[in-house]
Amino acid sequence: MASVHTLRQQRRVLPGFGLAMGVTLAWLGLIVLIPLAALLAKSLGNGPAFWWKTLATPRVAAALELSFFSSLAAAAVDMVFGLIIAWVLVRYRFPGRRIVDALIDLPFALPTAVAGITLTALYAGNGWLGRYLEPLGIQIAFTRLGVFVALVFVALPFIVRTVQPVLQDLDKEYEEAAASLGATRWQCFWRVLWPALLPALLTGFTLALARAVGEYGSVIFIAGNLPMVSEIAPLLIAVKLEQYDYVGAAAIGTSMLMISFVLLLGLNLLQRWLRKGRL
Amino acid sequence: MQVGIQSLGKSFGSTRVLSGIELEVKEGEFCALLGPSGSGKTTLLRIIAGLEFAEHGKVLFDGVDVANREARDRQVGFVFQHYALFRHMTVHDNVAFGLQIRSRAKRPARAEIDRRVGELLELVQLAGFEGRFPDQLSGGQRQRVALARALAIEPRVLLLDEPFGALDARVRREMRSWLRDLQRKLNLTSILVTHDQDEALELADRVAVMEQGQVLQYDVPQQVYDRPATPAVYDFLGGANRLAVRVSQGRVLLGNEVVAVLAAADDAAAHLHVRSHDIQLLAADAAEGLQAQVLRATWGGASTHYDLRLAEGSTVEVDQPRWAQSGQLLAAGDAVRLRLERFGVFGPVAGSHHGITG
């Protein structure tokens, strides 16, 4: 009797929880978990000691360091400027706004190799921008700075597109309420807007970071790929593959996976903590 | 505090939203700005708060023009229709916000802030809700938190923008009488914006009826209701019937029948306004009254609504209270007679006349 009752209660307008959950698990397994498991298995193919030995070489360590630090830096910079761009697009009406809005998506759509070649041409010593920057002692192409510039480019849309809808929903009333209570402009932003935007900003940061860590195409053209200097981890994987060192490539892959996982988990926990009390 | 508005005007682009506004709200008075949407009442309230700025005119707080002062320097308590509570803050932090952001010299000590927040939450009957978040409260509770937050800064004037608009009918009625008591207790000058005439008449000491950016009438509720200054006020307050009449030698003629006699009036065409519940239905064989025929009867609980056609052709709506109904309801086609109990006559020459027959 009791079980019949609970079954009745669980009826929904849209049925199909069982089917949907089944598809979800099957799809996740097929598309995400099986490849990851295969990667992990492959990387440990020659034993944990080999795995560690691969990672502990200075060249791999430098590549991992470059990949993650430049990705974090790019995501952080995009967070600031992405927020400003989203703010301008949402809060102001100006001629050409729609065009600017459409431009934001270009880094999404452009083949990454095209982006990389374009950036290289711009920032090389004889490029449009490079010819003015190099006399000032700022060399971007074929340096670590170039890696950073390319990552900033590809990660920007993630911040803008996640913050934009939240800003749109954030009624002007909140600022007005704060102002009528005596808040200065800075207090309005720092105490009212910033906390409301932070969860979306963090989501954007997470996506931008994930994209930047995995980016390959645009970076390899501008970076110059000097070992120990401007060689990113994904490139090193490709190098290992060309040398038929499949286990070594898989080892770098799993290490990136683990670092990414820890970073994303941390960001997720931070976000959950920020959302406390909200439904 | 006393609030004064003098010859205030405002446009959005080429649309005039307010023109020639004159208003005087006395110390401790509760004023309602009543009007349909688009009448400019919210814009006026926002100008008083400093959230919007007028092109010309004065906003006087105790005689001092504050028209150019920013909202944060005006010390007004503003309550929004959709509460505008800070969702990432607890109820305590929401209420304390206005105190916590003060510069160090003016900020009360932490214990003092906590004490004031506790007091205010008690005042709005939400003691013990300090740790909740806005999302965990009902609409009525959120609006009371918003009120406590506005009161925390000890405002010189309380401004309420359709504060009950988003609440359901029962909660709205409760909040209404509660707010009126609270306002009297605090003796705080308050201005309320509403499109609900019952709310305005019940709450306010004085009601300003607004339409198309102008104040049509500003008076105590009874005067506004019983002696509307213009046809538009009549239309807005209590959905009145509007009948074309002729005034001749002081007699108001509807068709060929004399509906009323005015003390003094010039001969002219005019309009007679009469509310649906100010008309009494008489039997068809009564000795007096306008002859009419029932077009439609709609039973509605407290009163029955009739659509009638007068002998001279125009249609009239009548609400008959339940106590006045005897025996069977009238049906379409039945003949009746009508007596107009209270009405107003407006004409280009005649000006306005208000009458009570009988």
Image (cartoon, rainbow, N blue to C red):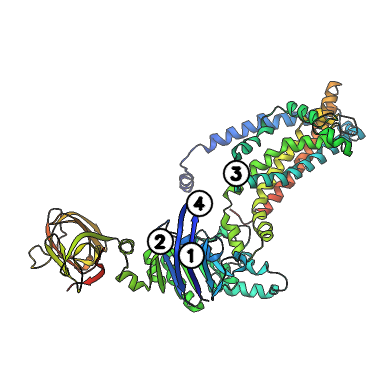
> Is disc 2 in the same subunit as disc 4?
yes
How far is the residue under mark 2 from the one under mark 3? 34 Å
> Is disc 2 in the same subunit as disc 3?
no
Instruction: Give the residue type at disc 3.
Output: Phe
Label 3, on which residue?
A: A94
Q: Point out which mark residue B13 bears.
A: 4
Q: Which residue shows up at 19% across the image and 74% down it?
A: B263
Q: Nearer the viewer, mark 4 or mark 3?
A: 4
Q: How many marks?
A: 4
How far is the residue under mark 4 from the one under mark 1? 16 Å
Residue A269 place in picture, x, y as percent: 71, 49
**Nearer to us in this view, B49 or A223:** B49
* Residue A232 visible in this rendered orientation of the protein: no
Circle 3 — which element? loop
Instruction: Give the residue type at disc 1.
Output: Leu
Instruction: Give the residue type at disc 4.
Output: Gly
- Left/right placement of residue B340 relative to residue B19 reads left
- Left/right placement of residue B120 relative to residue A37 reads left
Q: Chain of mark 1?
A: B
Label 1, on which residue?
A: B8
Q: Which residue shows up at 30% across the image and 62% down it?
A: B231
Label 2, on which residue?
A: B195
How far is the residue under mark 1 from the one under mark 2? 21 Å
Residue A155 place in picture, x, y as percent: 72, 38
Circle 2 — which element? loop
1 or 2: tag closer to the N-terminus:
1
> Is disc 1 in the same subunit as disc 2?
yes
Q: Chain of mark 3?
A: A
Instruction: Give the residue type at disc 2.
Output: His
Residue A272 place in picture, x, y as percent: 67, 51
* Residue B337 visible in this rendered orientation of the protein: yes
